Image (spheres, grey):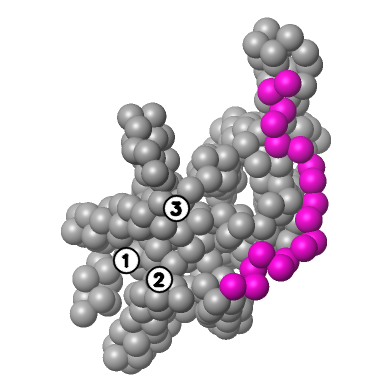
Amino acid sequence: MITSIFSKSKPINFILVFFITALAFLIANIKVGATLVTLTLVIKQFGLFFVCYSTILLLNFIVSKNGLTRNNNYEILLYSLFLLSLLETTQHTNILCANFFVLLGLRRILSIRSQISLSKKLFDAAFWIAIAALFYFWAILFFLLIIIALLLYTDNKLNHWIIPFIGVLTVFVFTVCFSIIYFGDYFGAFKSLPQINYDYTSYNTPVFIVVVSVLLLFGLWSSLFYIKQMKQKKKAHRPSFTLILVAFLIALAAIVLAPIKNGSEFLFLFAPLAIIITNYIEIIKKKWLREVFLFLFVLLPLVALML
């Protein structure tokens, strides 16, 4: 039944994902247990929900525009179910915004394949990733995607290698100017600092152990088939699939380095993981097996809520 609904891109799919995402926000706020519901809190939650659902729509655009999956909506279903499984990913403004801007940067990086307006795309990609780093410093790791994209497309033009750094410098200069005007010093606007934390004791809860284990287990299993399938893709499309795999690895690195380990840092993992797992689902020939595979992800949030 699940595969029948999401096997084709249809408006009903976006409505269902909308309600799953809304449910994630609702349950997260109930679990937080805010004693006083104020207008400010309601506006903030609506704002966060808008950013989160916009990210899902952006993910769908990236996938369909670059042919990263077949004509289905499994990736947005998985993304919304991931949110419902790890409710912490819906409650932190900085990470939600950073993830949105990282995907904006990824969209421009993947569009390099067309080789049209290359300088503008490189600048835009670096610009968006630099903005993401203002919200969450370790989002800057995704800048590596630009470098790898240039290597994959064997671009030897010196100006193309310089432009991404100009994009980052532009954000830095504008932020410093804003900081001087608003805070009266040079670095008052730089709230996200390069801190590292290797203490993982906060993950030692039943919810994190179960959810993270399932996500990583299925993610790594799907990655093996994803890598194998990349060789069968058209030569022009292979770099795009490689970049998604690299984004997956960078997201893992961001989780390892995260200064505050509360589960929200896993949000960076959701988009590449959803794409990789979707590619695995597509190669499962038996329909009942696809149903079982997807049902496990539907079951995961229910299990997480009971723990």
36, above or below 79, in the image: above
Q: CA distance from mark 1 to mark 3?
A: 34 Å
Give the camera-side residue of 214 and 269.
214
Mark 1 residue element: loop
Identify which amino acid the numbered label 2 is placed on. Leu
Which of labels 2 and 3 is toward the front?
3
Disc 3: CA contacts within 10 A as few (<14), some (14-19) or many (>=20):
few
Which residue is the site of mark 1? Answer: 72
Q: Is residue 67 visible?
A: no
First in sequence: mark 2 or mark 3?
3
Residue at 27 percent across and 71 percent down: it is: 7
Q: Which residues are magenta?
A: 188-205
Residue 135, percent from left and from top: 62, 36
Which residue is the site of mark 2? Answer: 305
Q: Is residue 81 visible?
A: yes
Which residue is the site of mark 3? Answer: 32
